[in-house]
Image: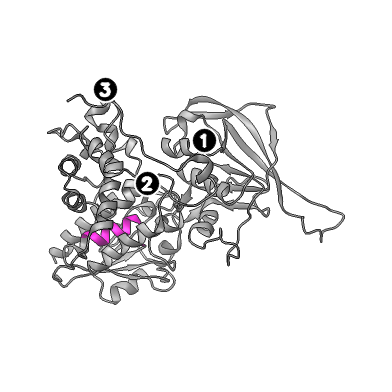
């Protein structure tokens, strides 16, 4: 049978419709489409796709079960190595990971591995009637700091081995960046809640509103009987450009903007934590967070949204799918542009004027690409005399985040690098015995699946460590 050279399209809401609602954009494969897509897999013996997956999902094996129509068996295969399949199927950059190494991609389009993973996970969530069962306890206790993807993965892997696991989350809802950072239209919060409930069924305790470093310290966790600690506290400290005007009203970090919308429901008519809606918005940055912020601003009623990015489309780090969705929705990409000042209204004759201190625009300079920098990307260089202004009423900075220094400042002997990331060895072990770390708290802002991979590595190391005691 001839192989279809192209993967089956993911059905989506129409751009003119979805730009005005927070419902999920991608609608998912139906059973017929999933079977057809699975039939494209060559079931390679050397399994190159698996080497591209940070959590080593048994990809050919689960797809083979999809081909047979045994979707529950496919889910159980994924579940052997991934605690968050419905999440990964939606937000992982498969084009740079598993699908990048797909044998079929040498000649045609790669198999839609992520789309099939999502289909299988959604099928299981819709049809499964039995809850996950907690295994027999092995008598050991482990504390997990943070309920983001690295923490939940570490917790799930250890719980399956019989560890008594407690997850401590600073916010009032479990899920970390999955709930406060990624918008509903990309990752419905009900999906995250379902994954968390599955972990609870395995015996994992989740305690919210506990700030490690303030409510409790790492040392106090050991005093409470925990024999090992995994730090997966993420990178929630936003970066700014340090240009004039960043203190004006209407300037947000993407973290604040998305948290207010995603977690605090600022899109409601009478929110407790409001954000500015409407007007014209400039989002500075080119990653997935920038796309999320821009598309959220549009859905909140902005009449015009710009992406301001200092490199070209080829260097844009966001997933291609997210960029394409943003373009379809009407986001205006101002590439090879860099902000130099945020402009604001100021009436010196009347300091009581309520408009004083608000954003009125952003001054940018045009860029061109020069020689490659340390990252291998061509360095953007300002073009003299090319400055211009964009008329905007809000500016969202989406240029990265750093780990919060709270845990480091309250934990003796915990070494960090110059960027504030916790220093670990190849097993996730920090400079403190029994203390492990992974995800954005170590690397700075990265992908969900890479954080999950770090949680999985640390879980194995913790198991080896405590099994030897």
Circle 1 — which element? helix
- Classify residue 228 by image quadrant: bottom left
Instruction: Give the total number of marks visible in the rendering.
Output: 3
How far across and down, in percent of the image, does residue 147 sit?
A: 36, 62
- SS at mark 3 in the image: loop
Residue that lies at the very extreme toward the bottom in this rendered image: 224
- Side of 124 where 185 appears, left or right: right
Disc nearer the start of the sequence (3/1):
3
Residue 142 visible, this orientation: no
**Considering depth in this image, is 16 or 217 the residue closer to the camera?**
16
What crowding class fits label 1: few (fewer than 14 Cα within 10 Å), some (14-19), or many (20 or more)? Answer: some
Residue 141 drawn above or below residue 237: below
Q: Is residue 463 left or right of residue 298?
A: left
Circle 2 — which element?
A: helix
Disc 2 versus disc 1: nearer the observer: 1
Magenta span = 147-157
Residue 5 is one of the magenta-drawn residues = no
Q: Is residue 154 magenta?
A: yes
Q: Residue at the location (26% across, 34% down)?
A: 111
Magenta: main secondary structure: helix
Q: Which mark is residue 107?
A: 3
Q: Position of residue 416 (x, y in %)?
A: 39, 54
Give the camera-side residue of 76 and 181: 76
In the rendered image, the vertical position of residue 273 relative to residue 338, given as above or below:
below
Disc number placed over residue 91 in the picture, else none:
2
Q: Which mark is residue 372?
A: none
Q: Relative to the observer, which residue lies in front, 170 or 340?
A: 170
């Amino acid at each position: 049978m001839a192989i279809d050279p192209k993967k089956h399209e993911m059905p989506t809401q129409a751009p003119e419709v979805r730009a005005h609602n927070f419902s999920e954009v991608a609608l998912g494969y139906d059973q017929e489409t999933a079977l057809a897509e699975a039939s494209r897999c060559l079931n390679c013996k050397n399994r190159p796709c698996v080497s591209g997956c940070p959590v080593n999902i048994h990809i050919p094996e689960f797809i083979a079960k999809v081909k047979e129509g045994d979707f529950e068996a496919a889910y159980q295969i994924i579940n052997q190595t991934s605690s968050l399949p419905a999440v990964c199927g939606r937000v992982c950059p498969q084009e740079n990971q598993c699908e990048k190494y797909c044998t079929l991609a040498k000649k045609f389009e790669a198999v839609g591995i992520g789309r099939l993973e999502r289909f299988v996970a959604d099928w299981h969530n819709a049809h499964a009637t039995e809850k996950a069962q907690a295994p027999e306890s092995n008598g050991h206790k482990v504390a997990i700091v943070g309920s983001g993807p690295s923490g939940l993965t570490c917790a799930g892997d250890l719980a399956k081995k019989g560890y008594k696991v407690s997850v401590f989350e600073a916010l009032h809802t479990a899920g970390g960046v999955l709930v406060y950072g990624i918008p509903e239209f990309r990752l419905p919060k009900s999906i995250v809640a379902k994954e968390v409930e599955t972990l609870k069924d395995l015996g994992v305790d989740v305690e919210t509103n506990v700030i490690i470093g303030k409510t409790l310290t790492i040392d106090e966790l050991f005093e409470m009987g925990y024999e090992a600690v995994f730090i997966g506290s993420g990178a929630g400290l936003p970066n700014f450009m340090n240009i004039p005007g960043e203190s004006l009203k209407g300037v947000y970090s993407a973290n604040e903007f998305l948290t207010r919308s995603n977690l605090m429901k600022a899109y409601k008519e009478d929110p407790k934590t409001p954000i500015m809606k409407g007007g014209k918005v400039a989002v500075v940055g080119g990653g997935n967070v920038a796309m999320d912020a821009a598309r959220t601003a549009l859905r909140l009623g902005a009449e015009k949204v710009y992406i301001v990015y200092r490199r070209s489309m080829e260097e844009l780090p966001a997933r291609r799918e997210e960029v394409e969705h943003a373009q379809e929705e009407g986001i205006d990409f101002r590439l090879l542009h860099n902000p130099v000042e945020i402009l604001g209204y100021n009436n010196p004759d009347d300091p009581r004027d309520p408009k004083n201190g608000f954003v009125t625009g952003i001054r940018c300079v045009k860029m061109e690409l020069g020689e490659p920098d340390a990252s291998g990307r061509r360095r953007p260089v300002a073009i003299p005399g090319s400055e211009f202004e964009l008329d905007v009423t809000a500016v969202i900075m989406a240029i990265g985040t750093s780990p919060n220094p709270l845990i480091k400042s309250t934990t003796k002997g915990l070494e960090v690098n110059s960027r504030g990331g916790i220093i670990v060895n190849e097993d996730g072990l920090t400079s403190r015995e029994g203390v492990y770390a992974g995800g954005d708290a170590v690397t700075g802002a990265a992908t969900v699946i890479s954080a999950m991979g770090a949680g999985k590595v640390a879980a194995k190391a913790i198991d080896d460590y405590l099994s030897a005691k």
